[in-house]
Amino acid sequence: MRFCASLATWLAISKGHLEKPVNPLIVNGFPRKPIGLKWELWGQKLESCRPYYHINLQNQCRISRNIIVRSELAGVGSPDAAYSLTEYQLGSKIRGIFFYAVTAVVAIFMFVFMLVIHPFVILFDRYRRKAHHLIAKTWATLTVFPFFKVEFEGLENLPSPDTPAVYVSNHQSFLDIYTLLILGRSFKFISKTGIFAFPVIGWAMFLMGTIPLKRMDSRSQMDCLKRCMDLVRKGASVFFFPEGTRSKDGKIGAFKKGAFSIAAKTGVPVVPITLTGTGKLMPAGMEGTLNLGSVKVVIHKPIEGNNPDILCNKAWNTIVDTLICHS
């Protein structure tokens, strides 16, 4: 009976009344691996499942996507690198918190001392204010010492403390001020007027004789230059960041000529200073973090002349050459 039924089915298929059964083990020439549920057809045990080759292809694609995502996040395609990056960022934030805590506590004590001696400073040293700068040097040193090392090169090129000069430097980070205060020279910084409103720090800057400047205000710029020239003629030194702002990409910008005009008109030397490392420790726009590293300060030989353009070009080339050597 089973033979007769099979023969009848074969005759029906050959005449076109029935479709030829599809072998579930072969799909488009690709063999299936028997896994899954089983059923019985034509006396054979068959299995229901997705094709084995399709499962392997999906697994390979999933593995590739995982590798690509991890590589983009971690920079190298390894779990250890991703973990290290998170740990490094967390450490930088914690160091930043401790850095500002230390600088705030030290600044309070230093400011009180500065406030007490201020009447005597105005009476005996109105323009240089060496005592205030000595206190500022102590504050900067105590703040910086626990967190990073500062190396100085070319200290013999510094003019004597009583010699007025125009100091210029590249500007990479908020830490530049701390680093330069450690030099111990009583030069007057140029600062935005908004900084003076900061408690303790802004008040100390006022006592030290820091010169305020309103950006994008031509009248304020002229008043600032006149005040700087007056201070230089009376024996004080001034400090400029000729770029006008901090570098956001680590590259040095063009120098503005205000500082060099003062030097040319007053006949005092220009002292170029190169700062390296501060931008990596605390990049511009990331003042809440403090990375690991060190800072190097290179003091170059003074430049003299009566042409602001020549002075500007010489100072810029000197600082750029040093940055290239240390990069």
Image (cartoon, rainbow, N blue to C red):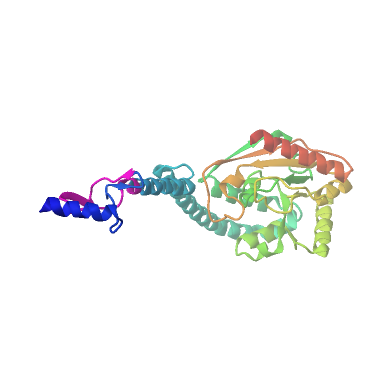
Compared across the picture, whether 307 is left or right of 162 comes to right
Could you say which is closer to the camera, residue 228 or residue 138? 228
* The magenta stretch spans residue 42: yes
* The magenta stretch spans residue 75: no
Taking the image as drawn, is residue 76 in sight?
Answer: yes
- Relative image position of residue 154 (x, y in whole percent): 69, 34
Q: Quadrant location of the C terminus?
A: top right
Residue at the spot 63% in from the left edge and 50% down from the top edge: 173
Residue furthest left in the image: 1
Quadrant location of residue 298? top right
Q: Is residue 139 above or below residue 195?
A: above
- Relative image position of residue 69 (x, y in whole percent): 45, 49
- Relative image position of residue 304 (x, y in whole percent): 84, 39
Q: Which residues are magenta?
A: 30-55
Residue at the spot 27% in from the left edge and 47% down from the top edge: 25
Taking the image as drawn, is residue 267 in sight?
Answer: no
- Relative image position of residue 251 (x, y in whole percent): 68, 45
Could you say which is closer to the camera, residue 26 or residue 72? 26
Compared across the picture, whether 39 is left or right of 214 comes to left
Could you say which is closer to the camera, residue 3 or residue 241? 3
Residue at the spot 75% in from the left edge and 62% down from the top edge: 215
Compared across the picture, whether 244 is left or right of 203 comes to right
